[in-house]
Image (cartoon, helix red, strand yellow):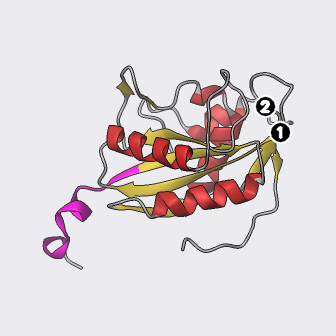
Amino acid sequence: RSRGSLSIWERNMAEAFIALGSNLGNREDEIIRAIREVNALPRTRVTGISRFYSNPPMGPQDQPDYLNGAVRIETALSPLSLLDALQGIEKSHGRVKTRRWGERCIDLDIALYGEESISSERLTVPHLGIEARDFVLRPLMDIDPSLTLPSGEKISELLSKLDQSSLTEAPFPQFSLE
């Protein structure tokens, strides 16, 4: 379609990347359900899905390993509206924050939102500590190997500096976005 025939929201789409993680319940089912729910958000569609990776927890070690992945979306939601929607999905899964870096049935974080750098009380984009988290960078690279942070740093270069030995690729499930 020509640009003139696009709806207002299609003309104002931003590309964003959402990091997903789970270490409670059926981790794979939690992530797949969350991906479907992200795809169903208003004026939003999933345009890329990474492989899934298993890794030890970043925080307290007395919890199960995580399963992590990422999705690329196009959205007309503002960063804070997207954050509210993602927190709504987490709540619908029964997520309860018990401790910092603790176990969770689902964790959805805005890793990147367009070329924006955001630092507010509620939201930091790029996601805080992204450059040191192989379990976020590797899935982002699966989706877009040429991806860069707003600072100009290449995801591939950041990832090459990290020890990725604890990151294990999980079998990728077949599923639809519906």
Image location (x, y in percent) of residue 18: 52, 46
Q: Residues within 10 Å of mark 2 (few under 14, many from 20)?
A: some
Which quadrant of the figure contains the N terminus?
bottom left
Q: Is residue 14 magenta?
A: yes
Using the image, tell me which numbered label, if any, was put on residue 170. Answer: none
Q: Is residue 169 magenta?
A: no
Using the image, tell me which numbered label, if any, was put on residue 65. Answer: 1
Labels 1 & 2 near each other (Cβ < 8 A)? yes
Image location (x, y in percent) of residue 151: 43, 29
State the residue in front, 150 or 135. 135
Q: Is residue 25 left or right of residue 151?
A: right
In three-dimensional space, the C-alpha distance between marks 1 and 2, rounded to whole angstroms, equals 6 Å
SS at mark 2 in the image: loop
Which residues lie in the magenta part? 3-15
- Amino acid carrying label 2: it is Pro
Q: Is residue 27 left or right of residue 50?
A: right
- Amino acid carrying label 1: it is Asp
**Residue at image x 70%, y 39%?**
135
Lower position in the chain sequence, tag 1 or tag 2: 2
SS at mark 1 in the image: loop
**Residue at image x 76%, y 42%?**
23
Image location (x, y in percent) of residue 85: 41, 47
- Name the residue tied to disc 2: 57
Image location (x, y in percent) of residue 120: 36, 22
**Residue at image x 60%, y 28%?**
131
State the residue in front, 79 or 167. 79
